[in-house]
Image: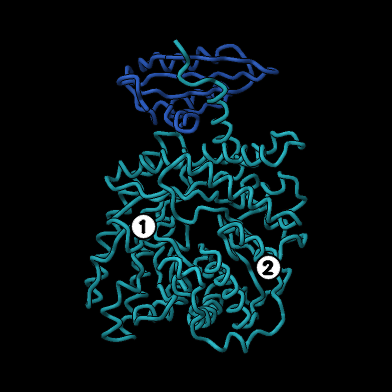
Chain colours: A blue, B cyan
Amino acid sequence: MSSRGSEELVVISVTGADKPGIVAGITAILAKHNVNIVDIAQTVVRGIFSMIMIVDLSTGNITLPKLREELYIKGKELGVEVSVHHIDVFKAMQRV
Amino acid sequence: MPRIISPEEISEVLEMLLFHDLDIRSATLSLNLQDCISRIEDEILSCIEEKVSLYSKKLVKAVDNVSKKYGVKIVTKRIAVTPISIIIEPLARKSFEEASNAAINIAKSLDRIAILNGIDYIGGYAAFVHKGFTQGDKVVVETLPKALALTQTIAAMINAASTATGINVDAIKDVSRKILEIAHSTPKGIGCTRFTIMANAPEDNPFMPGAYHGLGEPEAAINIAVSGPGVIEAAINRLDEKIDMRTLHDTIKRAAFKITRLGELVGREIAKELGIPFGIVDLSLAPSPKIGDSVARILEAMGLEYAGAPGSIAALYILTDAVKKGGTMATSSIGGLSGAFIPVSEDWGMLRAVEVGAITIDRLEAMMMVCNTGIDMVAIPGDTPIETIAAIIIDVMAAAIMLDKTLGVRLIPVPGAKAGDRVDFGGLLGSTIVMDVPKFNCKKFIERGGLIPPSIKRLDKG
């Protein structure tokens, strides 16, 4: 299913109380490791901030488990919930 | 550029994973041990030690890597081996006593390897006696209490009936006696949670205690058990209460598709990491004692006050059928038990239904017609007569061969306990209420012994 060449796509979701600096905090880690953001969707519903990002690890210098670890720590700092899953999970479950 | 996958689709999956306990219940490595067959005990033990240790380490590493890659929880790691009755056959021919000691030592050795490497269960302390006993089979049955009492991770299974050959009543009598012995040789009878007597036991079952490495299997394979009753319950709860039955069925089918797909993805990746074939996904949704992870709650979400209420057989039929249809579209590698599980102590909704009297042994017997559970994880009074235990088993076996399907019985006669008492087994096994058993006498019937012939269905096969 990884039809787009050598990309290694990962889904990052961030949810929590809305406040300044959430996007900056998360993207700073991605930039530090040269991870490219492929797609981003963001909503705020009743003060709950929700962001879903699809990023490409193939340009970066970090493995998925390491990135998850760093993002978890950053999420704790920011007071938001972060989850990191390989895109194949979503493709397997949502495509026939 | 069109989106690879929409935020709504991502959110739906995340909700399942993060809030509805969608996980992989078990990655079960099915492993051949026939190459360890020998007339010398030490040779058997060193062969098992070497092979199972090596595969345990590889399995744990592969499961951890895949879990980290996908961000999906894999709750347990298990191994299913060639039935021990086969391994000890040459020894059993030499001396019954020597073979019995060897069988117990094999169990202890497997247990050590499991604990050392972080394997949750090793299944395959098993024998197939649906038409009669070999010496090796006799050794396994005889040593069940010791093998279970002296280990923590060993799971045992005796297959006592099959559609093709009928029911071995002598085996059921022997095993019933052993069930009481197991109960009395382990605290609260907990050893019985690791033993099942089955009809038509499948060769590629990832679930304990019925898992073993079948004779038709390759050298090694990965079989997957999925969880996710919470996902189905949530999907039903999102529906309007007036939604009709067909739409209800369709909703379950769609959710089951997604759950099964996750199992297939994870199973294939673990198999790839291990360099062995991917076996099967068992479509059964395994419940756990955790709130929100209950099959009983699915039936209740459909509109029943409690699981076991009138209508429960139809509700369970809808669930099992929809899970199979959704699951079969999701993977061509189906296997194992693939139905619905309603183990009493392992499902908090089932336990609650027992507490209010909605679930009784009679209700479980009726419900097993449309699922593949039989009488599972049912605690009964410790003074239940052997013939009553045998009669409960024989009824389940008869249903299994008549309906041509897999069913099992996992009874726990709790020493000193009476009907209504609460017993806590801990962990995934949960806690339970001791259930009442029918008091009417069946001794003369059971005492007849011998074989019950297979049904006329046998002749369909030629």
- Residue under pointer 1: B116
In the displayed structure image, the side of residue B199 where residue B437 appears, left or right: right
The three-letter amino acid code for the residue at tag 2 is Ile
- Residue B177 percent across, percent down from the top left: 53, 82
Q: Residue B323: in sight, yes or no? A: yes
Query: What is the crowding at mark 1: few (fewer than 14 residues within 10 Å), some, or many (at least 20)?
Result: few
In the displayed structure image, the side of residue A61 where residue B12 appears, left or right: right
Could you say which disc has been placed on residue B11 in the image?
none
The three-letter amino acid code for the residue at tag 1 is Leu
- Residue B158 percent across, percent down from the top left: 45, 72
Q: For the N terminus of chain B, give its image quadrant.
A: top left
Instruction: For marks 2 and 1, give the CA distance.
Output: 38 Å
Could you say which disc has been placed on residue B361 in the image?
2
Residue under the point 63% across and 83% down: B385
> Is B73 or B321 nearer to us in this picture?
B321
* Label 2 element class: helix
Of the image marks 2 and 1, the number of the one nearer the N terminus:
1
Q: For the C terminus of chain B, give its image quadrant.
A: bottom left
Up the image or down, B288 lies above or below B326; here it is below
- Residue A50 percent across, percent down from the top left: 59, 19
